[in-house]
Amino acid sequence: MSLSSSPASPLEQILSRYWGYTSFRPLQREAMDAVVDGRDSLLVLPTGGGKSLCFQAPALVREGLAIVVSPLIALMKDQVDTLVANGIAAAGYHSALGSEQKAIVTAGLRERRYRLLYVAPERLASEDGAWFSSLTASCPISFVAVDEAHCISHWGHDFRPEYRQLGGLRSRLPGVSLHAFTATATARVRHDIVQQLGLTNAVTLVGSFDRPNLLYRVLPRAAVKAQILQIRQRHAGEAGIIYCPTRREVDDHAAWLVEQGVRARPYHAGLSDEERHRNQDAFLDEQIDVIVATVAFGMGIDRSDVRFVIHAGAPQSLEHYQQEAGRAGRDGLEAECVLIASAADFMKWRDILAKNGELTDARRALLRDIERYAASVGCRHKRLVGYFGEAYEREDCGACDYCLGELERVADAVTVARKILSTVARVGQRFGAGHVANVLRGHESDQVRTRGHAALSVFGLLRGASVEEVRGYLDQLIAHGLLQQMGDEYPVLQLTAEGAALMKDPTSMPSLSLARQRKPERGKLPRRSRIEAESWEGVDRAIFERLRALRLQIARDRGVPPYVIFHDTTLRELARLKPATSDALRHVYGVGARKAEDLGELVLRTIRGEESRQHEGHEGHEGHEGHEGKDLGYRS
Ligand code: ADP
Ligand code: ZN
């Protein structure tokens, strides 16, 4: 779309004026049109797809107040901060406000000062009848946007009973259009949202689930700390999330990373509320780079410049994986998602679910799917979108371990598989993966010696292969259903019926493929994805770093997270284009009118390298910023 050839529509003008964006992302225009036209709608886009803009921009076009329902205070605050920084009158009304702040917001509503109001679902329910009627009496409501709408469904991964109360909205706000937004794609959940909210003739828009800027890798788990450190080294000074399966591992890895000089902190449900919040805020405010967490960490985390997400253990489904890994690269810039997994992870999940009485066939199938993903030899983007029912057209995604040539297909997979299967059979199907790997590699461990297994004909069949390589094969054979692990504490490897069949008949599985990590050339770093290479092209790194420091300083002064000031995308663009005048600055992606006016001088000086004056610049600003926060009614 070219803005010069046709006059910009009101939405385009708003996008450019307040956000500094020049084009719509896929489905944004359609979704915004539905809101502007007052037609009920449901928009499904993956995390980072740009859903919030689809109700925020129309709120500025339509008359009246837009109400946004959001499940978490952290989410509300984040969005309100961002809007306010862009010069848009928005407020949140929630339990974390003091009575004085509530009074400010209430007065602002009466004066019809706001375009958007963020509230929790229970606020709109009948229980809070008085508040609700005073709201509707004080200002006309343009539309209601329900964010994270999957929370209304039992079938979603995050059901919240409060959301059920939204069912009454339709009758309580006759004539007001309802708009639902979610990143959860399954048909069941979609159907549920439409039903529960009572959407009529809803415009339904479902976007692509591919996240081309994410580089996916899977590593068989070996020395996990060394693996984490190596990934982190590619992202020194950048933001990352490391998910661990247990609290113990979270604490352990976090402490260890700190010893390694990484600015990291733990996050899990075993910490006090206070410590959890402190650590989360430290991450959002860029005081630390890395958060090591259980899955308790995530929803409502809107730090958009997360450059890597490591899973030090597999999650229980690909849906969980997509959600968690999806927290990387929300700004559209390159980010790396590494799943470090082993067959033991899936065993552990089956145990846990069985103990809780939750190991249904459906859960088994979900586990199986992610286990296969981890062991698959093929494009990971293709596999992930395929899982969500989408076709993937590209031959080479340019952003996964397979397409970057880091995996190597084993030349004669069937022969390798048969060597492994015979070894499992020869040790009597009574030993675990560690021992089987030792026998295959011809490694005389104590156990090999005491059992006399060095004398077996299979001893050393895969001599020369590394431990990781052999463990990787074992995991893959388990995922392909040729081997299984039995027993709780010390699981032993056994052949399945399919495994036994392949032993008898080498032609029984012609499509079997096995992969191993290609050995990196000495001193050579892994290749970068295409997106990464492009996004740094022409960027003056020194200016980028100076701008980052400036952003941090401004954010600290104003008490907001840095990404509220500028996204990395904008900083890179500034460091690439090096605008010299405020006019040129206004044309940079992500610089709206408000920010150009507010921060333009500082930014231009920083680009010119006038750092000392820049500092005086903001000390003078401090009083003004404090006032701004208060005026808008929610920052203390
Ligand atoms: P979601 O709610 O779908 O997870 P967000 O609304 O948070 O996604 O958007 C992700 C990021 O993309 C935000 O930083 C947002 O400002 C940015 N963004 C949204 N729409 C556009 C656009 N049309 N052009 C450029 N950036 C956009
Ligand atoms: Zn690929």
Image (tube, rainbow, N blue to C red):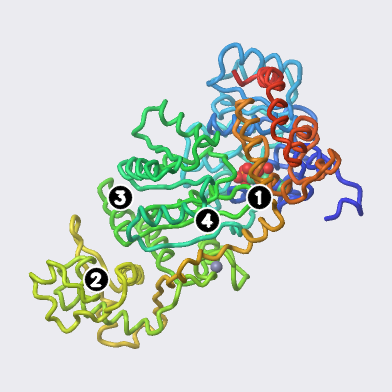
Q: Which mark is residue 541?
A: 1
Q: Nearer the viewer, residue 64 or 370?
A: 370
Which residue type carries mark 2? Ala
Q: CA distance from mark 2 to mark 3?
A: 28 Å
Q: Are marks 1 and 4 in contact (CB under 8 Å)?
A: no
| Residue 227 pos. (x, y %) | 39, 57
Disc 2 vs disc 3: which is toward the camera?
2
Task: Say above or below: 93 vs 526.
Answer: above
Residue visible at 48% across and 41% down in the picture: 298
Q: Earlier in the sequence, mark 2 or mark 1?
A: 2
Q: Is residue 246 visible?
A: yes
Q: Nearer the viewer, residue 460 or 106?
A: 460
The residue identified by callout 2 is 437
Q: Is mark 2 within 8 Å of ligand 2?
A: no
Q: Are marks 2 and 1 in contact (CB under 8 Å)?
A: no
Q: Nearer the viewer, residue 95 or 431?
A: 431
Q: Earlier in the sequence, mark 2 or mark 3?
A: 3
Task: Say above or below: 185 vs 619.
Answer: below
Q: Earlier in the sequence, mark 2 or mark 4?
A: 4
Q: Is 410 on the left or on the right of 610, as rendered?
A: left
Q: Are marks 2 and 4 in contact (CB under 8 Å)?
A: no
| Residue 106 pos. (x, y %) | 67, 16
The residue identified by callout 4 is 336
Q: CA distance from mark 1 to mark 4?
A: 20 Å
Q: CA distance from mark 4 to mark 3?
A: 29 Å
Q: Which mark is residue 353?
A: 3
Residue visible at 27% across and 79% down in the picture: 462
Q: Is residue 201 visible?
A: no
Q: Are marks 1 and 3 in contact (CB under 8 Å)?
A: no
Indicate the quadrant where residue 392 lies.
bottom right
